[in-house]
Amino acid sequence: MSNQQSVPDQDQEQPLITHLVELRQRLMYVLLIILGIFLGLFYFANDLYTYLSTPLTALLPEGTSMIATDVTSPFFAPFKLTLVAAIFAAMPFILHQIWGFIAPGLYQHEKRFAVPLLASSIFLFYAGIAFAYFVVFPLIFGFFTSVGPENVAVMTDISSYLNFVLKLFFAFGIVFEIPIATLLLIWSGAATVQGLRDKRAYVIVGCFVLGMLLTPPDVISQSLLALPMWLLFESGIILGVIFVKPTKDDEDDEHEEASEDADDDEDDDDYKYEEEFEQAVRESRDSKD
């Protein structure tokens, strides 16, 4: 019996070198798939950049265009864009490799919970990029191209524009993962639904602070990032209420908090009654005098 019980333990527990070899193999798969997508897209690098710059070029005054202030910009700007596009396109495969590496260490109920989260995180990341391109960019570029002095021609450098756009893509892609992060906090027990609701005011302030740090220094970009962050936080709380059932410990904590609040209210009432009684005694003494 002891030999039969030791075999499954040996199958489940693997030495560190085995995990390192598997990690190296999965990283090689990721690099190969990114390289393959990059080579397939590189022929269309200029077309990709033209499509990316459409929100700005469509709003430029007549007779102006984008410029390249560096000698290597006409080559390296589309090259960089193609590489980033290959990484974004390979994101489902990258997350699949990450999932394949960590899945053996999860319980069955954790796997059932993690698979929908993995799919949702991919969708939300792409949704954040789409929101930035179709909603945020027209508003931002429409504002910036219309507030300049009349004697200044708007001629944006292609490298500066690419860095600006990629920063916003990354910021909105990460921000749209807030519902997943909120749901994981509730599911892991690190936070409760009621606790997150109580901290709503601090979260709103934090959203605007992060919007200020992650976006260019203008109020429009900050607001367009902060408001979706707050709404996504609220949606994460709603998902937590729907999909995460409160444990007995959470219910006990809520009952304890409610009882403490009730005790505080009773103490306040007793203190109020004592003050009223003392005041009545003083008034009776004054009337006798």
Image: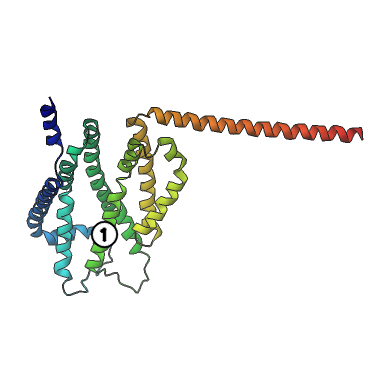
Q: Amino acid at mark 1?
A: Val
**Is 170 or 144 nearer to us in this picture?**
170
**Is 116 or 235 nearer to us in this picture?**
116
Q: Residue at x 50, y 33 (%)?
A: 257
Most distant residue in the front direction: 2
Name above or below for residue 162 compared with residue 126: below
Task: Locate residue 97, reporting x and y percent.
Answer: 15, 45
What colour scheme does the image use? rainbow
Task: Locate residue 187, reporting x and y percent.
Answer: 33, 35
Name above or below for residue 185 compared with residue 24: above
Q: Which quadrant does the N terminus fall into?
A: top left
Q: Residue at x 27, y 64 (%)?
A: 60
Name above or below for residue 83 compared with residue 70: above
Q: Residue 130 vs residue 272: left or right?
A: left
Name above or below for residue 100 compared with residue 287: below
Task: Locate residue 148, reporting x and y percent.
Answer: 36, 68
- Looking at the rendered structure, the secondary structure element under dot 1 is helix
Q: Residue 273 vs residue 244: left or right?
A: right
Q: Which quadrant does the C terminus fall into?
A: top right
Most distant residue in the top direction: 1
**Is 228 or 44 nearer to us in this picture?**
228
Residue 123 visible, this angle: yes
Q: Residue at x 25, y 58 (%)?
A: 166
Q: Which residue is mark 1?
A: 165
Task: Locate residue 249, reporting x and y percent.
Answer: 40, 30
Q: Residue at x 30, y 54 (%)?
A: 171
Mark 1 Cα shell of 10 Å, populated few (<14), some (14-19), many (≥20): some
The quadrant where residue 36 appears: bottom left
Most distant residue in the right direction: 289
**Is 41 or 242 nearer to us in this picture?**
242
Residue 65 visible, this angle: no
